[in-house]
């Protein structure tokens, strides 16, 4: 068995993602240095764009003293003291040559911004980007986004609204399009444009390895779109048709509508926090996604599910059938804002399968797990959904597996309090369990996953907390 080393990203995780993708299919140059300019200038857009305030980062960014904190990156001032570059104009714009953004400047995306095929946008540690209402960053199929911070200096995308008035959905989010396997080729990313710039997916025989870029130590705040389609996420981070060469590691999505949306593809995802999402699902997949996920922490405070999977509403057997493999998930529910909203830990619909092991689902108002139809029920088995700790879900705190999901009962399920009261804290959550029972009766992890994660949940009992140092939890 290959051992995955967390300290150095290797080909192992990609091998694991590709292995799952192939199995599912069988069955069914550096950019130019930035030149800072003063606020009010328009660098890339065809139009002048919205008028800049004298200092937009006086009023936007993360809360607390973070705007005034010295940078840990040599040569970079505190956020509030940096010059600001305005990206895009009223009509939006496209990046057609490699570009690098650094913490020597702040960035204000004023309108939808497109990264063209064959072009890379590289963003370095401690770089801050705020995004105007209705704007988004879309990396077209064949383009790449490389946003790599560090634990001490993450890259941050946030709302351009003033602190105290920021809310989920202030801006639409980040969208990465690729040509990895999906139900159909040339589907269109929801919530964006309707032309070829938003096309994603290579169909069932797409490029398993497609590289959409690298996202590491990245925070995305107050984003998310909307969609009228039940099985289509309007996510703060949309990964559409991305393959195994894509890196997603140490990413936080905070105060979004829908959090992470995965539309097909085979990429692996690890070390993800989705915190205090506003209205929709925290993590949602569809369109034939078949990759692995590990070390996932979710505060399910929206009116949906912490994890929601769909295959195809019109054809639940459409290939590739959505079937991600998830290990070490902690999903903690917080009562939704709307009493009429559904509130589940894991919701599978329209034929989606899932493998979920060594995980915790707790405090969801309606149920821990719900299955919507016969195709979904047939795809869910106790062998695939096992070694879970379930606590305080549904009516009376004991409605964990209602109706059809009752068939998932097995000896590997444990109805026991994992000790996650602190994980419900919206301002400073702690996802580490306080009950040592999460360390026993553990399923072996497959090749390519972290073999040291011998516990249930995203974090160990009395072990290293991988969420510290780079995450933040501003309320508004």
Image: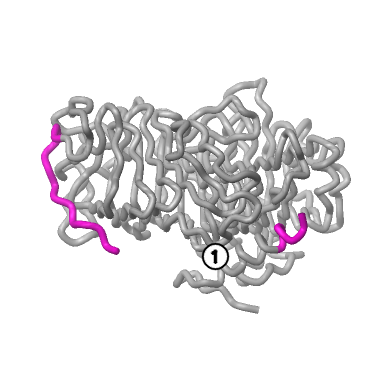
| Front residue of this view, candidates 363 and 127 | 127
Q: From this view, report whether residue 123 is shown above or below residue 221.
A: below
Percent from the top left, x then y, of residue 149? 34, 57
Report the quarter where the N terminus lies.
bottom right
**Residue, x 85% and y 38% (percent of image)?**
374
* Residue, disc 1: 463
Q: Is residue 72 above or below residue 128?
A: below
* Residue that extends furthest to the left in the rendered view of this protein: 38
Residue 60 seen from this side: yes
Residue in the image at 67% along x and 53% along y: 324
Residue visible at 66% across and 40% down in the picture: 308
Q: Any magenta on residue 26?
A: yes
The residue drawn where x is 30% and y is 41% is 94
**Magenta stretch contains residue 217:** no
Taking depth in this image into account, of 326 and 386 the one nearest to the observer is 326
For residue 109, side relative to residue 184 (left or right): left
Q: From the viewer's perspective, is 350 left or right of 140?
A: right
Q: Which residues are magenta?
A: 23-41
Colour mode of the rendering: one colour
Q: Is residue 434 visible?
A: no
């Amino acid at each position: 068995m290959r051992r995955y080393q967390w300290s150095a990203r290797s080909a192992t995780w990609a091998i694991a993602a590709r292995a799952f993708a192939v199995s599912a299919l069988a069955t069914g140059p550096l950019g130019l240095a930035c030149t800072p300019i003063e606020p009010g200038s328009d660098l890339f857009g065809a139009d002048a764009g919205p008028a800049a305030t004298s200092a937009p980062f006086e009023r936007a960014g993360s809360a607390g003293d973070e705007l005034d904190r010295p940078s840990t990156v040599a040569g970079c001032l505190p956020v509030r003291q940096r010059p600001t570059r305005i990206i895009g104009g009223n009509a939006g714009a496209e990046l057609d040559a490699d570009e690098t953004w650094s913490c020597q400047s702040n960035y204000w995306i004023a309108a939808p911004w497109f990264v063209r095929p064959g072009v890379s946008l590289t963003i370095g540690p401690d770089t801050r980007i705020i995004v105007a209402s209705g704007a988004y960053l879309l990396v077209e199929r064949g383009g790449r986004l490389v946003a790599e911070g560090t634990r001490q200096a993450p890259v941050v995308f946030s709302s351009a609204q003033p602190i105290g008035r920021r809310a989920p959905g202030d801006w639409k989010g980040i969208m990465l399009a690729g040509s990895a396997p999906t139900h159909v080729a040339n589907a269109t990313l929801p919530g964006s444009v309707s032309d070829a710039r938003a096309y994603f997916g290579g169909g069932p025989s797409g490029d398993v390895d497609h590289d959409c870029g690298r996202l590491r130590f990245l925070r995305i705040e107050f984003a998310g779109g909307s969609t009228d389609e039940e099985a289509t996420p309007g996510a703060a981070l949309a990964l559409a048709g991305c393959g195994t060469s894509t890196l997603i590691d140490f990413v936080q999505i905070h105060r979004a509508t829908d959090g992470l949306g995965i539309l097909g593809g085979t990429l692996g995802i690890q070390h993800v926090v989705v915190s205090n999402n506003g209205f929709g699902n925290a993590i949602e997949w569809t369109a034939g996604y078949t990759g692995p996920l590990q070390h996932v922490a979710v505060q399910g405070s929206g009116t949906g599910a912490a994890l929601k999977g769909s295959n195809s509403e019109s054809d639940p057997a459409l290939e590739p059938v959505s079937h991600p493999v998830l290990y070490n998930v902690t999903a903690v529910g917080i009562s939704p804002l709307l009493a009429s909203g559904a509130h589940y830990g894991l919701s599978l619909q329209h034929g989606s399968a899932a493998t979920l092991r060594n995980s915790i689902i707790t405090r969801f108002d309606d149920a821990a797990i719900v299955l919507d139809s016969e195709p979904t029920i047939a795809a869910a088995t106790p062998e695939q959904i096992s070694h879970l700790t379930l606590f305080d879900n549904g009516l009376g705190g004991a409605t964990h597996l209602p109706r059809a999901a009752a068939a998932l009962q097995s000896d590997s399920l444990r109805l026991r309090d994992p000790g996650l009261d602190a994980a419900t804290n919206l301002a400073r959550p702690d996802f580490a369990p306080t009950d040592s029972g999460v360390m026993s009766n553990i399923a072996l992890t497959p090749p390519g996953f972290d073999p040291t994660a011998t516990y249930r949940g995203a974090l160990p009992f009395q072990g290293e907390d991988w969420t510290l140092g780079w995450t933040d939890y501003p309320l508004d």
